[in-house]
Amino acid sequence: MEAISTKTMYEIEENAHRMGMLRIFMMENAGNGVARHIIDNFDPSNKRVVAIAGTGNNGGDALVASRHLARYTKPYVILLGEKADIKTEEARTNYSILEKMNKSIELLNVKEVNEKLINVIKEADIIIDGVFGIGIKGKIREPHATI
């Protein structure tokens, strides 16, 4: 498999969008792909799954994956920020869906690293990294830097 540059990835996504592929569907496909890989390879039904989501589209992908995994286990979703910090409509939409799934998904919003966050991560069998994506720029700030 060949790695592609950030610029090329942006171009691929923009081309797909111009051809009519909605960004929400691209996020759904990415998150479902992550969930499918976990389901096919790790049997999440007896595992503690933790999704760590940033506030961009990569975080949105992790939110989608968590929703799909909720059929097999009760994922713990950590948003590094608050709902108001989420940068895209697509990621906000997926976060709103998870809020309504409070019996099948456990949500934790954090702006700083604390003992509860550390314990949740330490107890995980599977961690979904939805923190940084192709849009990362500049210095990494807390709580992202510590995570």
Image (cartoon, grey):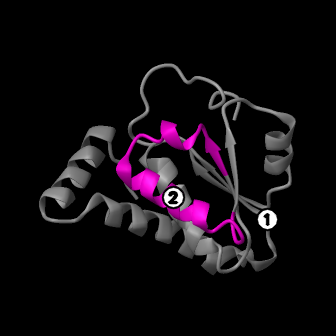
Residue 88, image x, y percentages: 38, 45
Magenta residue span: 78-105
Verify whether residue 99 appears in magenta. Answer: yes
Residue 143, image x, y percentages: 66, 29
Instruction: Note whether 110 is above or below 15 in the view shown.
Output: above
Q: CA distance from mark 1 to mark 2?
A: 22 Å
Q: Which residue is mark 2?
A: 96
User: Which residue is more in the foreground, 133 or 23?
Assistant: 23
> Which quarter of the figure has residue 125?
bottom right
Verify whether residue 89 appears in magenta. Answer: yes
Q: Is residue 52 left or right of residue 30?
A: right
Q: Is residue 97 left or right of residue 142?
A: left
Q: Which residue is mark 1?
A: 48
Residue at x 40%, y 59% (from the top left corner) = 1
Q: Amino acid at mark 1?
A: Arg
Residue 139, image x, y percentages: 51, 19
